[in-house]
Image (cartoon, rainbow, N blue to C red):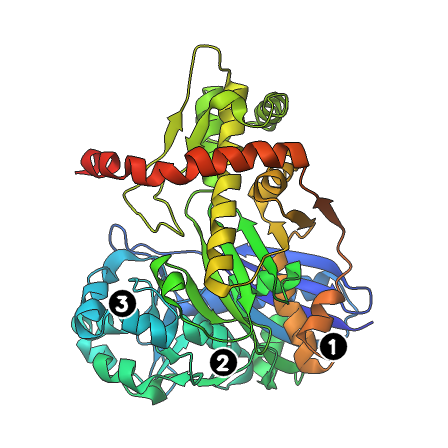
Amino acid sequence: MAHLIGIDVGTTALKAVLLDAGRGEIVDCVSYPNRAHHPQPDWSEFHPDEMWQGVAGCVHTLSDRNRPLDVRAVSVASMGEAGVPIDSEGRYLYPIIAWYDPRTEEYPGFWEQKLGAWELFQITGLAIRHIFSLNKILWLRANRSELVRDLSKWLCVEDFIIWKMSGRYATDYTIASRTMALDQRTKSWSPEVLELAQLDADIFPEVLPSGTVVGELAPDAASQMGIKAGIPVVAGGHDHLCAALAAGLVKERQLLDSSGTAQAILALTPRFQPTRELFQSAFTHYPHVVENQYVVQGGAPAAGGAIEWFARLLTGGVGSVPVGAYAALFTEAAAVPPGAGGVLCVPHLLGSGTPQNDQVSRGTLLGLSMDHTRGHVFRSVIEALGYSLRENVEAVEAALSERIDEVISVGGANRAELTLQIKADVTGRTITAPQLEEATATGAALLAGVGAGVYADVREAAYSLNVPSRSYAPNSNALATYTQRYHSVYLKLHRALEDVNRELSS
């Protein structure tokens, strides 16, 4: 029985899964908290040794619970952008600054001035944001200059765990892309960007395709993890993309809707094509863990978060909404016909996300009357997420000149059947919902199998999973109702409310 181990180093949790490659099933999963430290208000950091010990502990527990094991390989998926600076002796120079930490918010202005947003997008496929690794290095140089003088390597989180396991400095294309230093046209470190940052390319590790063997599991790491030394350590990838692999996003004309608290939208294209349309819609564009495929990534900052906020408001509660109260809301919403009785919601509780990219836009309820119930309101929220999904699907189609036939939906906000059926009815696309619990770590395990030769390639790995799924086809009558409302009202709302929202935010 061939086993594969996938590790997910996430923002709040460290996870390890054990995959039975023969049956295509997850045997077990272990999760430890990933503790963030806050040395100043709003700052968030991870201690490298704590992170490594947590990862090793997850795997050790997994091993102890499932002996005997025949582990063929191990791989890592991780959060992007965050990383640890180390010196030539392998000593940590500073804690890992969390990807979302705001201390680097001054640096987007630096890049706007030195290079420009459109120029940077054409090189890196990224919109200018404070989160990327280069900005953390610039902050360290400005505020901890004595440490940066000793900087030998910058290791993103995946790279750091790989180094601890194998002793080799290496990264994969997807994580390298989150540094803001990778030239997507050549898949190498960008001389132009690094010159502006006054950094040498050799501070970054070697870049490899996901699913490539980096080295062997070192004896000391093997002892800490409770598995045998010498097995292949395999390059993994960015967490969203590993989850997409496990969900089956491996070919064009598919789109992944991964909706938890926030929503990530992913579609595939076989080449890097940084179009004006993608840039203006604030999509990012970088390699997938599937070789010779690129992702187009967008989404919304409030998806499941919007549903939860409205549910809490409508039930009069505080904190988490009880399961029974949620069920009642969905039952009431299901009894309301498509169109929510004329109620329409704009779910921009944290800004619009793609394709408007308007941080000032805010949530709105329209069309309310005394005849409406909370079922109408709650259904309008779910329908709004469907409209947002359709808008993103159509923006991707326009940018790539290719129709999206299938939407794969995963994540906690996509578990309700009503949500999935409404999304099918609004978008006019079939919605496929694989029943995946730990998609990110599972994707890493699949990449481990590619590196070890268990699978011929990444697509075979994805198709090997034995995961039940549900499928939702659009209802033609509901689609007609939603299409009329989408064109006649929804698409006009952002522009109609734009000046009002700016006045309210001033």
Q: Which residue is mark 1?
A: 455
Looking at the picture, tell me which residue is in the foreground, 384 or 166.
384
Which amino acid does the dot numbered 1 rest on?
Tyr
Find residue 66 and report its horizontal and vertical position in percent.
Answer: 75, 63
Looking at the picture, tell me which residue is in the foreground, 85 or 451.
451
Could you tell whether 270 is left or right of 317 in the image?
Answer: right
Quick check: 188 above or below 430? below
User: Could you say whether the residue bearing mark 1 is in a helix, strand or loop?
Assistant: loop
Which amino acid does the dot numbered 3 rest on?
Ala
First of labels 2, 3 by sequence position: 3
Looking at the picture, tell me which residue is in the foreground, 150 or 436.
436
Q: Which mark is drawn over residue 117?
A: 3
User: What residue do we see at 64% from left, 55% from top?
Assistant: 405
Q: Residues within 10 Å of mark 1 (few under 14, many from 20)?
A: some
User: Could you say whether the residue bearing mark 2 is in a helix, strand or loop?
Assistant: helix
User: Could you say whether the residue bearing mark 3 is in a helix, strand or loop?
Assistant: helix
First of labels 2, 1 by sequence position: 2
Quick check: 378 above or below 141? above
Find residue 102 and report its horizontal and vertical position in percent.
Answer: 27, 56
Q: Which residue is mark 2?
A: 163
User: What residue do we see at 38% from left, 80% from top?
Assistant: 183
Quick check: 19 above or below 492? below
Distance between the Cα atoms at labels 2 and 3? 33 Å
Which amino acid does the dot numbered 2 rest on?
Trp
Q: Which of label 2 and label 3 is nearer to you?
A: 3
First of labels 3, 1 by sequence position: 3
Find residue 207 and report its horizontal and vertical position in percent.
Answer: 47, 84
